[in-house]
Image: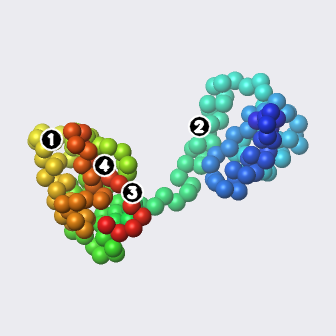
Amino acid sequence: DIMMPEMNGLDVAKALRRESEVPIIMLTARVDEADRLIGLELGADDYITKPFSPREVVARVRAVLRRTHGQAPVSSVLRSGAIALDTDAYEVKLDGAPVELTRTEFSLLKAFMENTGRVMTRLQLIDTALGYSYEGFERTVDAHVKNLRQKVERDPGNPRYIVTVYGVGYKFMELSDGP
């Protein structure tokens, strides 16, 4: 809204646009063409005047998201500390050196890195890395995690990346330095 009680919506749009490409939709009572043009020039992706239909707002939000979705290049490389996992090239590097992983180990590492800081249960890891059709034992995940730790941890017995959350599962830790 342009006429917010504590701040000017135009200034907010300008500041947002300077820092980000996040979609901006202005909802305002100001209907003058000059106001619409200023809002759009300062970075708004759409400008809706009051009163408006909630269905129209939803349609406009969807339209803006369609236009803006995928514009920013999305890196296929997940990084944490010394680990780099490239989902497009299907390769993992540790300190820049290639690491040979099985398909399951790669899928597990990808699941961990996409969920950094979140505890994942064995069942979640089975669903994510092994697929819903897997009919083995939950503890099979432990063996795969052990093998993965051997390949990506400096001290697999005292892991820094893939830590055990006893009684629950595992958590991948974000590290800024090497393993």
The quadrant where residue 122 appears: top left
Mark positioned earlier in the residue sequence (3 or 2): 2
Residue at (85, 33) in percent of width and height: 31
Please name the residue that numbered disc 4 is placed on: 171
Give the amino acid at mark 1. Answer: Glu
Mark 3 to mark 2 CA distance (whole Å): 33 Å
Give the amino acid at mark 3. Answer: Glu
Element type where label 2 sits in the image? helix
Residue at (18, 60) in percent of width and height: 157
Place of residue 37 in the rendered image (x, y in percent of width and height, measured from the top left): 83, 46
Residue 69 in view of the camera: yes
Contact, mark 4 vs mark 2 (Cβ under 8 Å): no
Q: Residue 138 carries which label?
A: 1
Residue 89 in view of the camera: no
Quarter of the rendering occupied by the C terminus: bottom left
The quadrant where residue 166 appears: top left
Please name the residue that numbered disc 3 is placed on: 174
The answer to whether residue 142 is left or right of residue 34 is left
Give the amino acid at mark 2. Answer: Arg
